[in-house]
Amino acid sequence: MYKAAILGATGVVGQEFILALQNHPWFSITRLAASERSAGKLYHEALQDKNGSTRWYCAGAPNKNIQNMLVEDASKMDMSNIDVVFTAVESEEAKHLEPRFAAHKPVITTASAFRYEEDVPIMIPGINSAHSALIKKQRDRGWKGFIVPGPNCTTVGLAASLKPIQDSFGLNQVIMTSMQAVSGAGRDGGVLALDITDNVIPYIPREEEKVQRETKKILGTLTDGHITPLDLAISCICTRVNVRDAHLEMVFVSTKKPCTPDEVKRAMIEYGRRISDQGWPSAPKELIVVLDDPFRPQPRVDRDTYDGMAVVVGRIEQATALENGIKYVVLSHNLKLGAAKGAVLIGEQLVKEGYIKES
Ligand SMILES: NC(=O)c1ccc[n+]([C@@H]2O[C@H](COP(=O)([O-])OP(=O)(O)OC[C@H]3O[C@@H](n4cnc5c(N)ncnc54)[C@H](OP(=O)(O)O)[C@@H]3O)[C@@H](O)[C@H]2O)c1
């Protein structure tokens, strides 16, 4: 078993990491860490707020062992009993914490702090698996370990659904509007019930830039230790809606070669099935599921498809306003494929490739 530490273990994504790892066949949770506020408490104590109410947000519960583990101060932890670090802290904290760990250990992160650095890939296993080769470049920093982030939770559904279209027909333009769940804002940055109930918030700071930039990097080409982002015109509007989990995205695409909705559907289905050949325990049977019912996908009904690890697509139709236009709706779980379990899937790819080793 590979010994895993979780930083930010008490937050929304940290809790999903616990669920993704506590019965994992390859990883065992050996260390938990969060802020000074939680340090020195047992995990179940650290989850309580000042009124004694337990702040556990996920479906499923931490097992007894985990509940009684000590939570450490992430900024003061030593590196013992760790083969890999999974991190779920805000970007500001990640900027300082992650390099300290990466100097010694592999770090897989849900934070954005290092996503845009030249020697850092943004990984979606099965979509841009080959980008892991960029990890070797990080040795130039003098690190024994490395940092590999997953994408922003809104990028993942878009980039994964675009990849088969790019491979089969080429991409010219992408226009996307998202309707994002409240859990996407996390516990600390959380959306107030008073703001979101009976409402839609038409702006999420910095989200659109992240999605646009990350999609081009993920769909880009790695050559000679450098990722050339895909040359793609892409514009997004990201909104917050009164949904608990999963982001729904409305996508318009102009392709290079003409294609029909049926051809796009076939390309997505065929591409999505390849992931099951990899032997990664957290991989869904199909990474992309295409539904014919025009009333789907819906967050409440479809977010748990393959335990939240599938990208669910519907309404693939011609978009007549665009040259070679196709439109569709895509749904992905922001906390599972879009965060913790997606990061664990990265860990599984990196174990198979020998980047994560037992100490
Ligand atoms: N929510 C999503 O859907 C989602 C999806 C993809 C990526 N992400 C990214 O994942 C990361 C975590 O997001 P989240 O939604 O889980 O946030 P969150 O619910 O607000 O949790 C924040 C976590 O960070 C810990 N923390 C705060 N300050 C710290 C410090 N100085 N040192 C160490 N730990 C510290 C908190 O510990 P205490 O309990 O001790 O305060 C808590 O465990 C963020 O970078 C976010 O952008 C989130």
Image: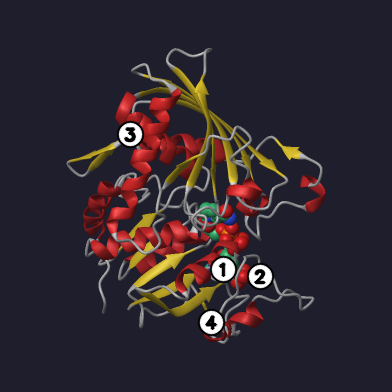
Q: In terms of sequence position, does the residue under pointer 1 or pointer 3 come before the other?
A: 1
Please state the quadrant of the image where ligand 1 appears.
bottom right
- For the residue pair 82 and 254, the one nearer the viewer reads as 254
Q: Going by the image, does 189 lie left or right of 15?
A: right
| Mark number displayed over residue 15 | 1
Q: Looking at the image, is mark 2 or mark 1 earlier in the sequence?
A: 1
| Image disc number at residue 66 | 4
Cα distance between the residues tagged 2 and 4: 13 Å
Q: Mark 3 is on which residue type?
A: Pro
Circles 2 and 1 in contact, beta carbons < 8 Å: yes
Residue type at numbered disc 2: Trp
Tell me which residue sits at (36%, 56%) in the image.
148
Answer few, some or many: residues within 10 Å of disc 2's Cα (few below 14, many 20 plus, some between 14 and 19): some
Q: Determine the residue located farthest toward the front in the rendered image.
A: 293
Mark 1–mark 3 distance (CA, rounded to whole Å): 33 Å
Is residue 126 visible in the rendered image? The answer is no
The image shows residue 179, relative to residue 337, as above or below, that is above
In terms of sequence position, does the residue under pointer 1 or pointer 4 come before the other? 1
- What is the spatial separation of the Cα atoms under label 3 and label 4, in whole angstroms? 41 Å
Asked which quadrant contains residue 140, the reply is bottom left
Tell me the residue at 42%/52% (across/down).
150
Q: Which residue is mark 3?
A: 229
Q: Is residue 229 above or below residue 183?
A: above
The image shows residue 174 at horizontal and vertical percentages of 47, 26
Mark toward the start of the polypeptide (3 vs 2): 2
- Dot 2 or dot 4, earlier in sequence: 2
Is residue 184 rendered to the left or right of residue 79?
right
Quarter of the N terminus within the rendering: bottom left
Which residue type carries mark 4?
Ile
